[in-house]
Image (cartoon, rainbow, N blue to C red):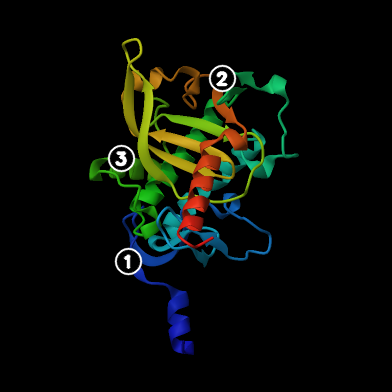
């Protein structure tokens, strides 16, 4: 690449900011914050793969350089920083662990073999920081044109509603787009994963019945957030204390790495790659 071409590339492209709607020069915007996706101190490339895909070596996180201008990125950074601090203060992410197994059995309420519950006191202000943060991740993934985020598709009305919440830094009621936190409480293999859209099953009104709600599953640094794509208050209230910010304390599902879906998914991808000769 010539010097002239290099200079032009560094300046970035002009366009309309997907967040602010203003015209300007695009800047590099991380879809998932770098602080929660750093896999090594030296920054070497990581192996990226998916079921049925061909593995490749690439930077350990994903960014979009045609999503927002500087003003838009500043807004996202204003959302990211306090939310990351809050997650670390409440020991919700692996980067805040003081050991590989920081929680005593007394800190976890046993529910079944699959998971326990961590009951943590998150004030309304901190809950709003986290809710706004996870909504912003949903918006970034859905608004990005990068192929890695093709599994996060929202309708135009839903995407605009969430964009407005991010732009104005107002997440709304805890019953709107309710969020369930699912934490891996023992340190496992460090990795990153793109958000995906899926269905989340909840108890129905009748005994034994289930209600399937569309959701976005976000994984970062040992923490999973399920953002339910509904503003139906009855659905959210049915979550009880599992609904982030709905009460004075929030129940966080707690699993060991070996009993987590994260572990199962990683194992499935590795085995798939081995079978297809990419081990």
Q: Image check: 51 left or right of 77?
A: left
Choose between 138 and 51: the one closer to the eye.
51
Mark 2 surroundings: few (<14), some (14-19) or many (≥20) residues within 10 A: few
The one of 189 and 121 positioned closer to us in this rendering: 189
Q: Which residue is mark 3?
A: 161
The C terminus - image quarter: bottom right
Answer above or below: position of 215 versus 49.
above
Q: Which mark is residue 112?
A: 2
Q: Position of residue 139 (x, y in %)?
A: 38, 47
| Circle 1 crowding by C-alpha within 10 Å: few under 14, some 14–19, many from 20 | some
Residue nearest the observer in this picture, 81 or 117: 117
Mark 2 to mark 3 CA distance (whole Å): 37 Å
Between marks 1 and 2 in the image, the one whose residue lies nearer the viewer: 2
Q: Residue most toward the top?
A: 207
Looking at the image, residue 132 lies above or below residue 21: above
The residue wearing badge 1 is 15
Measure the C-alpha gap from mark 1 to mark 3: 22 Å
**Residue 147, above or below 245:** below
Q: Determine the residue positioned at 49% across, 23% down.
A: 242
Viewer can see residue 2? yes
Expressed as whole percent of the image width and height from the top left, the position of residue 52 reads 40, 56
Q: Is residue 99 left or right of residue 168?
A: right
- Find numbered disc 2 in the image and state the secondary structure of the residue it sits on: loop
Q: Classify residue 260 as left or right of residue 161.
A: right
Report the number of discs. Answer: 3
Q: Quadrant of residue 179?
A: top left
């Amino acid at each position: 690449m010539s010097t002239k071409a290099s200079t032009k590339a560094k300046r970035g492209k002009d366009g309309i900011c997907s967040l602010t709607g203003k015209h300007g020069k695009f800047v590099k915007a991380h879809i998932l914050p770098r602080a929660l996706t750093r896999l090594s101190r030296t920054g070497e490339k990581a192996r990226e793969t998916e079921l049925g895909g061909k593995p490749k070596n690439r930077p350990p996180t994903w960014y979009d350089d045609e999503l927002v201008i500087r003003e838009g990125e500043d807004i996202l950074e204003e959302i990211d920083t306090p939310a990351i601090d809050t997650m670390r203060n409440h020991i919700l992410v692996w980067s805040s662990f003081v050991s590989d197994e920081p929680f005593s059995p007394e800190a976890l309420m046993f529910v079944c073999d699959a998971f326990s519950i961590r009951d943590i006191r998150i004030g309304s202000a901190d809950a709003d920081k986290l809710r706004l943060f996870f909504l912003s991740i949903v918006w970034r993934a859905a608004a990005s044109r990068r192929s890695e985020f093709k599994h996060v598709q929202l309708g135009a009305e839903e995407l605009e509603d969430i964009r407005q919440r991010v732009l104005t830094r107002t997440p709304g009621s805890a019953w709107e787009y309710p969020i369930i936190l699912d934490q891996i409480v023992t340190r496992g293999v460090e990795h990153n994963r793109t958000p995906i859209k899926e269905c989340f099953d909840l108890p129905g009104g009748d005994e034994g019945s289930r209600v399937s709600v569309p959701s976005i599953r976000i994984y970062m640094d040992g923490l999973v957030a399920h953002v339910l794509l509904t503003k139906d208050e009855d659905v959210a209230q049915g979550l009880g204390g599992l609904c982030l910010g709905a009460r004075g304390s929030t129940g966080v599902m707690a699993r060991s790495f070996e009993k987590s879906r994260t572990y199962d998914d990683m194992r499935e991808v590795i085995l798939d790659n081995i079978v297809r000769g990419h081990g």
